[in-house]
Image (cartoon, rainbow, N blue to C red):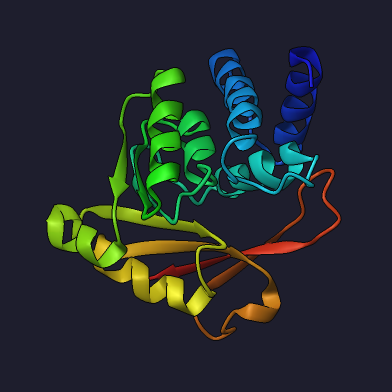
Amino acid sequence: MNKDTFLSQISEGAEALGIHLNSLAKDRLFLYYSELERWNRKINLVSRQQHDWIAMHFLDSLVPLGLGLVKPGSRVVDLGAGAGFPGMPLKIAGEGIFLGMAEASGKKCAWLRHLARVLKIDGAQVLDGRFEDLVNNGWAGFFDLAVSRAAAKPHKVLDLAHPFLTSGGRVLVYTTEALIEKDLGKVHPYKVQGSKVPSVIWEVTI
């Protein structure tokens, strides 16, 4: 995909979510997209059969910003960061976020370090290792917010997130309404432009 097409689609989709992307954010997101295409040929970061990465990954990741669920200056941990979604788009488009990308796969950690370096991102750190080990290595109670897309079943994500969070910290799980406990937390339905699948952000305060 050429840059003009990408920028047009990401800008239009973000505006539909109530998010304005500045020129630096849009340039970084395009470079992210380009590097993801290149690296995905070597290691399996995202499905190679999924061509609409803009809606499926980039815009979907940005949804909490449009919903006002990520406060400026937040310390955010992405649990199971993988290809960098949702944490890196939130970092790129958010205001003053510190991002910790927790990932156990060595190959994916190498990708995340490369991505942060190429995008010239400050205030982002790869947390390399198992979640349990990371908590014991100084990250317990450090973060205000945990986010996760498909790292584990939603209730498991809550258990995994708890040790990383400050008192009153929140968890945002990208999921479907059928997988949440309706009496716990808040449910924020959304649908990304270009996506046929309605989803929810499940917000739980720890």
Rendered residue at 84%/44% (across/down): 194
* Residue 154 position (above or below residue 24): below
* Residue 68 position (above or below residue 200): above
Image coords of residue 8 (percent x, y)? 79, 21
Q: Is residue 9 visible?
A: yes
Q: Is residue 147 left or right of residue 18?
A: left
Q: Is residue 167 visible?
A: no
Image coords of residue 158 (percent x, y)? 41, 73
Task: Using the image as rendered, state which of residue 205 and residue 101 is in the foreground.
Answer: 101
Q: Is residue 58 left or right of residue 81?
A: right
Q: How many marks?
A: 0
Q: Is residue 9 left or right of residue 33?
A: right
Q: Is residue 192 left or right of residue 141?
A: right
* Residue 43 position (above or below residue 181): above
Image coords of residue 183 (percent x, y)? 54, 86
Rendered residue at 63%/79% (across/down): 179
Rendered residue at 57%/26% (across/down): 32
Query: Which of the 4 image quarters holds residue 120?
Result: top left
Q: Quadrant of the C terminus?
A: bottom left
Task: Using the image as rendered, state which of residue 83 and residue 43 is in the foreground.
Answer: 43
Query: Which of the 4 image quarters holds residue 2?
Result: top right
* Residue 111 position (above or below residue 76): above
Image coords of residue 46 (percent x, y)? 64, 46
Rendered residue at 48%/79% (across/down): 155
Task: Using the image as rendered, state which of residue 113 and residue 42 is in the foreground.
Answer: 42
Q: Quadrant of the N terminus?
A: top right
